[in-house]
Image (spheres, rainbow, N blue to C red):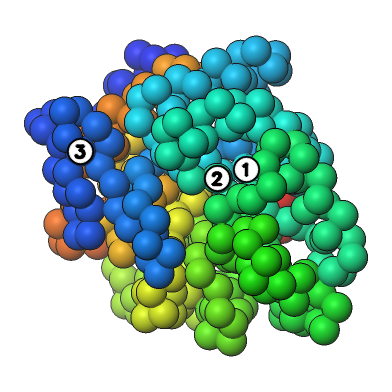
Amino acid sequence: MRISRRSFLGTTALGSLAVNAAVGAEVGKNGALPTRVLGRTGARVSILAMGGGSRFLMYKEEDKALEALNRAFDLGITYMDTAYGYGDGVSEARVGKVMAVRRKKDGIFLATKINKRPGDEAMRIIEGSLKRLETDQVDLIHIHSLTDEEDLRAIEAPDGVLSRLLKLREQKVTRFIGITSHSDPKVLATALERHDFDCTQMALNAAQTGMQDGHHGMEINEAMKTSFETVALPVAVRKNMGIIAMKVHAQEGLTGQAPAEKLLYYSLSLPVSLAVVGMPTLDFIEQNVHLAKAFKPLPKSEMQELSTRLAAKHKRALDQRFANHVDA
C-alpha cells in the first residue's frame, strides 16, 4: 500500500487547526494530543493510538519500525496496541524494545491481545508476550477477535482463556482485561453483558453503522440494521467500559469515499475513549496526529448524513469482509 503525503492531504479539508475537546476529552495543552479517560480503568490516554497490526508490520526493517514507534510517542501518542497474532510475536518484540525505554518515561498505556482459547495454550502465549514486551505487567490484555457463539463458548469454558485472564488480573500480571471483535456485534454484546470486562475494542466506522428502514425507498434487512455501534456499543457505555474504536478507515476500504478527517472524527465523535489506527509510514503518523489535535466532534446531523451515504454503498461488503478477517 502506497499513499503519498499529497494524496492523503488531498482528502482532508482541514478547517481550524485549534485543538478541541469532545465529550469526556481534555483539550491538549501546548499543542498536545487531546486525552480521554479509558472508562472504568481511570487511565487517561491519547485519543489516537498507535496500531501494531498489519500496517505496522509494513515496516519491513526493524529499525524503521522502531523509528516509527518513537516518532509516535514523540508526537504525544500514549496508547500502544499490539498482539501476539501480529506476525506471531514480531509486533510485540518490536514494541518491547521501545517500551523498555519509553513506557515509564512517557506514560505509555500498553495493550496486547491473545488469540488462543484453551487456557493452557493461552498462558504459554502470554508468558512469551511478557518476555517480548520486556515487562512483568501489561496494562491491558484483550481476548482477540471474538467471532461467533461457538467461539464465545470456548472463551467461557472452565479451562478457557477468560478464566485465566481473570486470575492474571487478580495477580496484577495485567491491570485490566478486555475483548475485541469485528465479526458479530450481537455476540460481542452478549459477551459484554455476561462478563466483567474492563475494556472492549470494536469495529466502529461511518460505513458499518446500522441503517434505518425506508432509506431512499430501500428495503433494509436485519443484517443491514445491525452494527457494533447500535448493538454492542450501548452495552459497553452502560457498563462504563473503556471503549476503543478500530477499523475507522475499514483498512483502506473507505479511502477516498470521504475526507480522511471525517472518517476519523466520526469514530471519535461516538462515546469512545480513543481510536486505534494503523500507520505504515512516518507521514501517516504525523498526519493522523495532526488530525487528532484538530479534532472537533461532528454534529449529529453530519454523522447521520455521512453514515447513511457510506453504509448504503459499503456496509454489506465491509460486513462480509470483516466477518472472517484476521489482522495478522
Total labels drawn: 3
Side of 156 relative to 119 (left or right): left
Q: Quadrant of the N terminus?
A: top right
Q: Earlier in the sequence, mark 3 or mark 2?
A: 3
Residue 41 quadrant: bottom left
Nearest to viewer (mark 1 / mark 2): 2
The answer to whether residue 136 of the structure is visible from this angle is yes
Question: What label sits on residue 28 in the rendered view?
Answer: 3
Q: Which amino acid does label 3 sit on?
A: Gly
Tag 1 and tag 2, C-beta contact below 8 Å = yes
Dot 3: element: loop
The answer to whether residue 268 of the structure is visible from this angle is no
Position in image of residue 153 (x %, y %): 77, 81
Side of 142 relative to 24 (left or right): right
Position in image of residue 223 (x %, y %): 53, 75
Q: Mark 1 points at which residue?
A: 82
The residue sitting at 59% across, 86% down in the picture is: 194
Q: What residue type is labelled 1?
A: Thr
Q: Mark 2 points at which residue?
A: 110
Position in image of residue 44 (x %, y %): 35, 52
Side of 118 relative to 167 (left or right): right
Dot 1: element: loop
Instruction: Give me the C-alpha separation between circle 1 and circle 2.
Output: 8 Å
Q: Front-most of 254 and 80? A: 80
The residue sitting at 82% across, 60% down in the picture is: 122
Q: Which amino acid does label 2 sit on?
A: Leu
Q: In which quarter of the image is the C terminus?
A: top right
